[in-house]
């Protein structure tokens, strides 16, 4: 009975996080204005979901993020949409890049939840307090998104990226590293703050919900 109650709460929590990802991905709420750049917030529920519900749930939420990215880049393509939509990659004569685009759009986002979830488990095994573990997971989870996406673009689609940016292929590495160390670090700092603030509140709420459900079950017994 206790496990069934927890599983139900877990499924509801994951569904709410998935709904939040879809909302952020389709509204201006998915971007926050920083001093230099606009940083995405869509990966924040993925990281928090991985903390609250584990790596498997985090991976599922990452897939939701990736599918939203793929749909957005398919319905409203931009200069680099060939790297995030297998459909755009195919229609622009890059059929061979369709699988690569699917990995970048969805696979790399699955890694956010997987890495964040297992990192949280590892840090808690080290008995790190929540307020120390949450910022680490927030920063690393965000950088996982940036490093996997940009690293995959460099490894799999460097020539197409150079063509899109109208630069020599030798300049691609510098552009990729500039994105990782510039926008990527700024987004990671924003994630650090948001995951710490929101994650602490939600962790307490999940613990209270589970304890309340356990108390009711024991009373009924």
Image (spheres, rainbow, N blue to C red):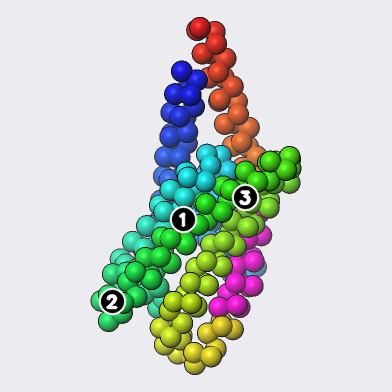
Residue 153 image offset from top left, x and y in percent: 47, 75
Q: Could you say which is closer to the camera, residue 46 or residue 4?
A: 4
- Give the image quarter of residue 126: top right
Question: How far is mark 3 from mark 2, CA to CA?
Answer: 36 Å
Question: How far is mark 2 from mark 1, CA to CA?
Answer: 23 Å
Which residues, given as a range, are shown in magenta?
Answer: 176-194
Residue on which the image places disc 3: 119
Q: Does residue 186 belong to the magenta stretch?
A: yes
What's the residue at 56%, 67% (across, down)?
147
Going from N to C along the chain, the mark reached first, 2 or 1, is: 2
Determine whether 165 is above or below 118 in the image.
Answer: below
Q: Spot the residue most to the left.
A: 91
Residue 207 image label: none
> How many C-alpha atoms fall within 10 Å of the one at disc 3: few (<14), some, or many (≥20)?
many
Residue 110 image label: 1
Residue 106 image offset from top left, x and y in percent: 41, 60
Q: Could you say which is closer to the camera, residue 122 or residue 83?
A: 122
- Give the image quarter of residue 214: top right
Residue on which the image places disc 2: 95
What's the residue at 47%, 50% (across, down)?
59
């Amino acid at each position: 009975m206790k496990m069934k109650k927890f599983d139900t709460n877990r499924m509801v929590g994951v569904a709410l996080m998935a709904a939040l990802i879809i909302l952020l991905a389709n509204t201006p709420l998915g971007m926050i204005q920083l001093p230099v750049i606009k940083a995405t917030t869509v990966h924040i529920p993925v990281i928090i979901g991985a903390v609250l519900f584990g790596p498997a749930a985090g991976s599922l939420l990452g897939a939701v993020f990736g599918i939203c990215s793929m749909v957005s880049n398919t319905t409203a393509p931009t200069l680099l949409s060939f790297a995030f939509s297998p459909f755009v990659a195919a229609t622009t004569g890059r059929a061979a890049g369709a699988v690569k685009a699917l990995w970048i759009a969805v696979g790399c986002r699955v890694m956010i939840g997987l890495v964040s979830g297992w990192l949280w488990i590892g840090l808690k095994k080290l008995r790190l307090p929540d307020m120390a573990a949450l910022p680490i997971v927030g920063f690393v989870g965000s950088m996982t998104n940036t490093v996997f996406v940009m690293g995959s673009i460099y490894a799999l689609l460097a020539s197409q990226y150079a063509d899109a940016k109208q630069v020599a292929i030798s300049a691609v590495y510098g552009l990729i590293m500039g994105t990782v160390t510039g926008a990527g670090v700024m987004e990671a700092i924003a994630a650090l703050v948001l995951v710490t603030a929101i994650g602490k509140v939600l962790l307490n709420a999940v613990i209270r919900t589970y304890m309340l459900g356990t108390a009711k079950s024991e009373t009924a017994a």
